[in-house]
Amino acid sequence: MALIWTIACFALMIVMYLIYQSIKWGSEEHKWQEWFFKGAATAMSALLAGYGFFSRPSSTALLILIGLCVCVAADVILDRHFLAGTAAFALGHICYCAAMVLLQRPGWPSLIVFLLMAVGVFALYPQIKKLEKDKSTLPYVGYALLISAMFSLSIAQKPLLMLGALLFAGSDVMLLFRIVKNIPSKRYDYLCLGCYFLAQFLIAASTVF
């Protein structure tokens, strides 16, 4: 039953994602439909996490489910207000981090990875600064450090959770690169968001398997 539910949610996620992209890259703007299908794609991962939680209730599964539900809202908010959407995603990441700490206590490897990633974040600060020339970039730096913490904590977790965190971090790096370099490529956008939705699905699947 778990495998069937997982396959069904994955198939529906792909369908929602492809509809979202077809509307986004269509000749006409249909923002409400675009937001709906973007959120619906992430909602399929939340649906899978809900199945995982109700099948095997635990605090970690509940935190992941809450994090995914927050990310569904963040998907919509991000397109309307970038900073508010970033804050919503940060809340989702906090839920993921809390779940990981409960699952497996972090050790020295996680700390070392976090410190290395933090150095990378501050090395990229001039690029992050370009996002908001006349405003504070501290929220974005804080978000980048939170992503770094999530991935660092994931290296002690089960493979599905670790891979999900890796893809999430990779997707955000690609998004930053796309914004800074102003890349209009449709293929690049499919790759960036494809990694994001797959990341969410793998995080959700960690509650089932």
Image: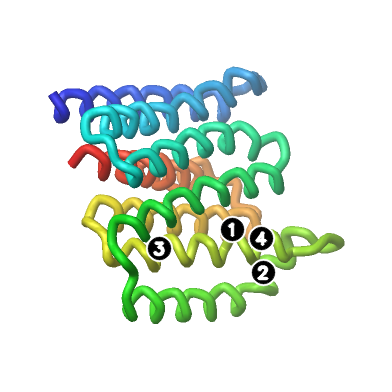
Residue 120 shown left or right of residue 110 in the figure: right
7 over 183 or under it: above or below: above
Q: Which residue is mark 3?
A: 151
Sequence-wise first label, 1 or 3: 3
How far is disc 1 from disc 3 in space, using C-alphas? 17 Å
Local crowd at mark 4 within 10 Å, few (<14), some, or many (≥20)?
A: many
Sequence-wise first label, 3 or 2: 2
Determine the secondary structure under disc 1. Answer: helix
In depth, the one of 113 and 13 nearer the eye is 113
How far is disc 3 from disc 2 in space, using C-alphas? 21 Å
Sequence-wise first label, 3 or 4: 4
* CB within 8 Å, label 2 to label 1: yes
- Between disc 4 and disc 1, the foreground one is 4
How far is disc 3 from disc 4 in space, using C-alphas? 17 Å
Local crowd at mark 3 within 10 Å, few (<14), some, or many (≥20)?
A: many
How far is disc 4 from disc 1 in space, using C-alphas? 10 Å
Determine the image quadrant of residue 16: top left
